[in-house]
Image (cartoon, rainbow, N blue to C red):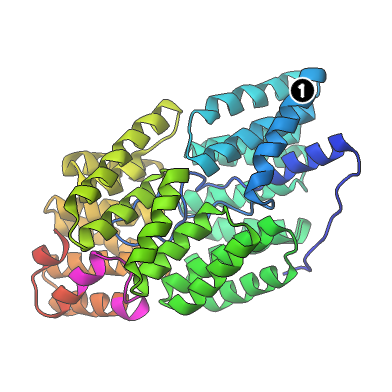
Amino acid sequence: MQALSGKGIGASRLGRLLALGAALALALTAGALVADDGSPPKAVTTGSAPNPAPARLASGDLDRGVSQLQKHLKAQPRDHASWASLGTAYVEQARVSADPSRYPQAERALARSLKLRPGNDPALAGQAALAAARHDFDGALRLARGALKVNPYGEAALALRVDALVELGDYKGALKAADVADSRRPGIPSFTRFAYVHELRGDVTTARKVLDRALAGATSPGDVSYVATALGQLDWRQGEYKNSLRHYATALRADPAAVAALEGRGRARAASGNTAGAIRDLKTVVARAPLPTALVELGELYEARGDDRAAKRQYALVGTWLRLARAGGVDVDLDTALASTEHGDRAAGLKAARAEWQRRHTVHTADALAWALHAAGRDKEALPYARRATATGFGEAAFLYHRGVIELAAGDRAEGRELLREALDRNPAFSPLGAKAARAALAGATGKEAGR
């Protein structure tokens, strides 16, 4: 990895606005609508980016930056660069607030920029970010590549190319793209992506070293918060809850409004036995950004403590968000598959999982399809997908749990128990409901009792 770079921001007001827009372009990843990739089983995870990439600014700066850009464009409506910045900022606002209605605004602003200056790379990168946020990863990759043809050193496009390849399941290509990003524009965006691709390939040691280095070199509140959150997620997936909580504390000191860090802390608190604290955190999260992941996580915490009415209220809100997201042009098949398989119409869940698998072959989509097939009683058909989800070595206990249950149901009792044991060894409290089911399976329960 290259040395962390520190770049100054222009002194003029407009220079600051444009720098803000460029930085915001990096805050949009293939998983832009997802709080993070490492959610417990039964929680909705729509993407595999490590958490929407480096925000690089404290959360409060985003709204101020948007307001300033809007005022500037009223006075200078032909400023193509500011239109590109505003469009990109709208996409980031949609992520932060879980408000997909921002996407059409972003689309119009970016189109305005390209009309004023055809082929300008900030607008192309913004369009790539918008496509990724809508889960159009083929489009995101095409647009990122187009932006890089114009400017091979564009930081946002370099980052988005990695994200799109990750979301399309091309992990070899993603690693190569991460190496290119690091060689051309070393810094927080390339470091975090490099780390995540290595984690996806089972190399947790390298991922941790890179993130530790990135955190040591981070200076802005947004960078510190983002990298610390990524470390918290990595630790949580490895069952290292104390370290996870320590990193989330660092993230929240840097940016108290960081939703991803707050959600991660809630998950780590739940795993540590602090259910009341976890519920408080997740209630705050869903009040700010009612995304499926957090809604289902909160619902399952309620369900685990016997409050079924409160749980059902959270699950019902997932459907509301899915409808809003679909109206904003978002592909929500993976969200639908995960939510419906666990807490809704299983037939709809399987249909959505199949549709998503047709578009992209990632470990996350493989796991979702396997689990939906299992829920439909089709374990023999589910098994190849469950095995594919665990083939890269990515340390997600939920995938091991799902495959273990499916192996049991398909008749391989020894393999199923071994996988369930591995899931619990790696992350003993990976889910309020799933971990309990995994322990029941190891104690001699049937595959049906463990997973359906």
For this view, does 178 lie left or right of residue 421? right
Residue located beneath label 1 in the image: 73
Crowding around mark 1 (Cα neighbors within 10 Å: few <14, some 14 to 19, many 20+) is: some
- Quadrant where the N terminus sits is bottom right
Look at the image and tell me whether residue 392 can be seen: no
- Quadrant where the C terminus sits is bottom left
**Does the segment drawn in magenta span residue 431?**
yes
**Does the segment drawn in magenta span residue 195?**
no
- Image location of residue 272, percent across then percent down: 37, 75
- Image location of residue 262, percent across then percent down: 49, 58
Q: Nearer the viewer, residue 84 or 390?
A: 84
At x 66%, y 27%, the residue is 110
For this view, does 206 lie left or right of residue 66? left
Look at the image and tell me whether residue 136 can be seen: yes
Vertical order, 28 against 220 (above or below): above
- Which span of residues is magenta-colored? 424-438
Vertical order, 442 against 396 (above or below): below
